[in-house]
Image (cartoon, helix red, strand yellow):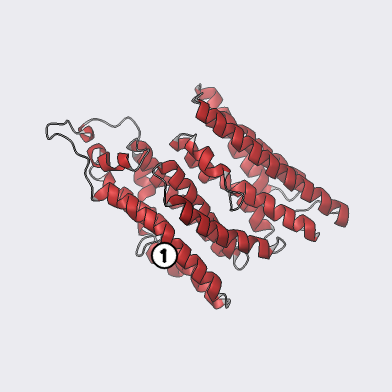
């Protein structure tokens, strides 16, 4: 893809997200979401591989259906109330429809089936855009309507997503599918707590992006695609292997790493709201996610690939990709836990 086309697509992605985040009118928000979807499709299918084409088709169909639901719910609300403002969502059916549509946009269970397939057909860089930047616009709409959306639907979808994300990742060997199920589980935490504290939901999203970015960059740097490939990461960079391991454990929410902070504050808030059963379900479901993160960490740091002693080490060669973004993104993904007192709502 030529640099001009790439820059146009990235500019369209950014413009679509900014339009949705800045709008208070449903039609403008819908237009931003559509622009966002259309800009990412050529990026997904860039490699012209049949799997990439299939991934872009699945992404388009899912996102188009979700956008149609958003438009339908806004028209219903306008018909019932005479208002097109995002902050005036008062029709009960429109609220439920919008919640389901945004859940489909984000990839919350049970509308999550597209996310693992799309990520598996995309490159790591495209996958990074899908699991981080593409979540900003629908999460903004969810944050704007958090006190008007269907709370029961959100909480049920959130708790189901945490469980599905943990169970779905257990049997995977492809790292992109593991990352997809990890994304589903983290989105479940955000959807669950957004009904009680939108600030904590925003903190969950921020920390998820901060941790996922260096993890995807490190996997791209070492050209790692499966669990078996993790065993040879040390030959690419001996220093990157333990840092990637800590990033994985941080994503699983293991203390004293950064990923523990949003889970700790979320469970604390749920207990303060007398929702101990829901907090227990979330904590137990997260153990499933932590198990497959531990398994990946074991493959990455404890096992070594069988190889002859005279093999030339890849880490002696000059890397093809820039390491500056990875170097900047790694410290906050591991060392942010001491900032927890500043993050309490």
| Vertical position of residue 8 compared to residue 118: above or below | above
Q: Relative to the observer, which residue lies in front, 300 or 14? A: 300
Rendered view: 285 above or below 313 = below
The quadrant where residue 322 appears: top left
Q: Secondary structure at mark 1?
A: helix
Q: How many numbered circles does the render carry?
A: 1
Q: Residue at x 57, y 78 (%)?
A: 274
Determine whether 45 is above or below 102 in the image. above
Q: Position of residue 122 (x, y in %)?
A: 49, 34
Q: Position of residue 263 (x, y in %)?
A: 46, 64
Quadrant placement of the C terminus: bottom right
Query: Where, by quadrant of the figure, is residue 31 drawn?
Result: top right
Which residue is label 1 attached to? 339
Name the quadrant containing residue 313.
Answer: top left
Residue 272 pos. (x, y %) = 54, 77
Query: Between residues 304 and 217, which one lies in front from this camera angle?
Result: 304
Q: Residue at x 68, y 44 (%)?
A: 66
Instruction: Identify which residue, 144 or 236, lies in the foreground.
Output: 236
The residue under the point 25% across, 49% down is 301
Whether residue 178 appears in this view of the structure is yes
Q: Is residue 76 rendered to the left or right of residue 203?
A: right
Residue occupying the far top of the picture: 2
Left-right relation of 212 to 60: left
Q: Which residue is situated farthest in the front direction here? A: 171
Could you classify mark 1 by the number of other residues whose Cα lies within 10 Å: few (under 14), some (14-19), or many (20 or more)?
A: few
**Residue at 34% of width from left, 45% of height from top?**
327
Decide if residue 345 is in sight here.
no
Residue 201, percent across and down? 56, 61
């Amino acid at each position: 893809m030529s640099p001009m086309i790439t820059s146009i697509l990235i500019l369209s992605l950014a413009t679509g997200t900014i339009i949705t985040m800045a709008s208070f009118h449903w039609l403008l928000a819908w237009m931003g979401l559509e622009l966002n979807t259309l800009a990412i499709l050529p990026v997904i299918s860039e490699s012209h591989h049949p799997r990439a084409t299939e991934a872009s088709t699945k992404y388009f169909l899912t996102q188009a259906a979700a956008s149609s639901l958003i438009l339908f719910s806004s028209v219903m609300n306008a018909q019932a109330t005479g208002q097109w403002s995002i902050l005036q969502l008062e029709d009960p059916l429109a609220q439920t429809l919008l919640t389901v549509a945004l859940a489909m946009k984000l990839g919350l269970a049970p509308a999550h089936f597209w996310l693992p397939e799309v990520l598996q057909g995309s490159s790591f860089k495209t996958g990074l855009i899908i699991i981080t930047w593409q979540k900003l616009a629908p999460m903004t709409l969810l944050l704007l309507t958090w006190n008007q959306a269907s709370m029961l639907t959100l909480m049920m979808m959130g708790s189901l997503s945490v469980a599905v994300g943990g169970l779905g990742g257990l049997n995977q060997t492809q790292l992109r599918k593991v990352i997809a199920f990890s994304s589903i589980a983290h989105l479940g935490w955000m959807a669950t707590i957004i009904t009680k504290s939108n600030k904590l939901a925003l903190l969950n999203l921020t920390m998820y992006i901060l941790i996922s970015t260096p993890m995807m960059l490190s996997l791209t740097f070492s050209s790692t695609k499966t669990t078996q490939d993790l065993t040879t990461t040390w030959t690419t960079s001996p220093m990157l292997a333990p840092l990637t391991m800590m990033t994985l454990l941080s994503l699983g929410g293991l203390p004293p790493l950064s990923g523990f902070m949003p889970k700790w504050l979320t469970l604390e808030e749920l207990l303060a709201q007398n929702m101990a059963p829901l907090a227990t379900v979330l904590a137990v479901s997260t153990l499933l996610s932590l198990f497959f993160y531990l398994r990946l960490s074991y493959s990455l740091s404890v096992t070594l690939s069988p190889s002859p002693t005279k093999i030339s080490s890849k880490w002696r060669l000059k890397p093809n990709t820039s390491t500056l973004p990875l170097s900047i993104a790694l410290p906050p993904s591991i060392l942010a836990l001491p900032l927890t007192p500043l993050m309490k709502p």
